[in-house]
Amino acid sequence: MDSLRGFDEDYGSAADDEPAMDAPPAIGTDERRMHVRAYNHWVSLLDGRDYPSIEDLDVENLPDFGPHGVLLDFTCGAENPATPYIGERLREECEIGQEITEISQVPKRSLLSRLTDHYLQIIANRAPIGFEAEFVSQRGCSTMYRGILMPLSSDGDTIDFIYGVINWKELADAGTSASLVGEVGAALAGAPAPLHSPVWADGPSAQDPDTETSHASEATLVVGRFDDFSETEEEDEDAVSALPEDAGLADRLCVARETAEAVKTADGRSRAALYRALAQAYDFALAARRNPEDYAEILEDAGLKAQDRAPMTPIAKLIFGTDYDKTRLTEFATALDHGVRNAVPAVDFGAYLERFPGGLKGIVASERAARRPASALHSPEADREALRHAPALAHVDGLPGEDEFVLLVARREADGSLGIVAEVAGDEALLARAIRNASVAL
C-alpha cells in the first residue's frame, strides 16, 4: 500500500478535542532523488506565494524529471481533471499515446494511475504530498515507485492545477531471483573467508563481523540501475484479527493495541497496517458505546477522562498511546467520529477507509467540513442576496456614492435613537465580514 508524506506545514497545533491533520515531516536534501529535485523546483517557483503560478511552470522545458511528470488541470471540475501534459517516459512505461486527455481514461493498473490516484490528498492538505509503495503493473511486473504531487494556482489562492513526478524500478520475477540466489550462494561457498575490518554503524557491514549467518536466501534481484530508492515498503495483506461477537471490551482493546503497535513499529509507513489498526479501534469504539460502564472503568485505570466534544480522542489515546503524535491522534479520532456519524458497520470500516476518496485524509477533511457551522458555508453572493431581501430598519438620506452596500458607524443617543456619524469606506474586507455577520444574524 502507499504511504503518504506531506512536505509543507499547513495545519497549526490542535487542542485535544479539535481534529487536525498530521504534521508533515521535512523533505530532506538528498538531491539524488528525483522527487526531491522536483520539489526544490516547485519551491523555486513560489516567489513568496502560497502556491506557484501555473504560468511559471514550463512543462516542456523542465530538468531531468520532466519526462516523468504529469500535469492535472482542474479548471473544468475536480471530479475528472484533464491531463494536458504527460511526460514521454511516463507514456512509454504506461504504453499510452496522446489519446489520454483526462484522469478517467488512465488505465487502472498503470503506473500513471498510482500517481493520479492521490490528487485528492492535495485538495485536502493544500500542500505537496509524497508517496512510495510497490504494486503489480498492468504488464504483471512487480514495480516499486516513489512520487510527489505539488499544487499550483492560476489566481494565487485556488488549487486548480497539480504537477506530479514519479520514478520507478521493476523487480525481477521469482524464477530469476531464485536463480541469482543460487549463483550467489555457490560463489560465496567457494570464496575465501573475509578479513575482519572496522564496521561502520550505518554502512553495508553494519553487523558483528563474527556473525556467520548467511543472508543469501533473502536476496532480491533488481532489474536495471536505479538511484532514487533507498528503502522499500512491503504490503501486509494479513486479515484483521477476528473477535467473537461476545468478546469483552478488554479483549478488544488488547487486539486493537497489538495492531497499533505494528503501525508504530513501521513508523506509520504502511497504509494497510494503519487502516487495520483503525478498523480495530473502531470495533473497540462501538463496543465501548454498548458497554459504557466497562469503558469508564478502562478510562479510569488508564488515567484518561471522557470528552464530550471529542469522544473518540480518549479511545485513540488508549489504543495508540498517550505519547503518540498529537495531530495523528486527533486525525484518528476524527475518522472514528466519521464512522459513527455515518453508521459504518465495524466489519466494513477498513474497506470503507480504502474506498473513501482521499482515504484517511479525505475522511478527516469531510468530517471537518460536516462540523463547520452553516454560516461558514455561505458564499459572499449568498450573504449579499440575503441582505437584499431583508426588511430595512431605517432610511437615511443625503449620503453620497453608488455602492449597493455601505458600512456605517452609528452613535446611540440619550433618547435611544441612533445617529449616523461616519461611513467606513475603502475597506472591502471589513465590509465583506460585516455583510457575512449581518446575513447570519437574519
Image (spheres, helix red, strand yellow):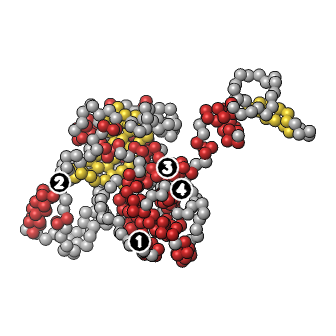
Q: Are marks 1 and 3 in contact (CB under 8 Å)?
A: no
Residue bearing the label numbered 1? 245
First in residue order: circle 1 vs circle 2: 2
Q: Which is in the foreground here, disc 1 or disc 2?
A: 1
Residue bearing the label numbered 4? 19
Q: CA distance from mark 2 to mark 3?
A: 41 Å
Quarter of image, res 276: bottom left
- Say which mark, if any, is on residue 172: 2
- Few, some or many residues within 10 Å of mark 1 (<14, 14–19, 20+): few
Q: CA distance from mark 1 to mark 2?
A: 44 Å
* Amino acid type at mark 4: Pro
First in residue order: circle 2 vs circle 4: 4
* Amino acid type at mark 3: Ser
Residue 226 point in image, percent of width and height:
24, 49
Front-lying residue, 282 or 431: 282
Residue plotted at (48% across, 66% down): 286
Residue plotted at (42% across, 74% down): 246
Residue bearing the label numbered 3? 366
* Amino acid type at mark 1: Glu
Residue 260 visible in rendering: no
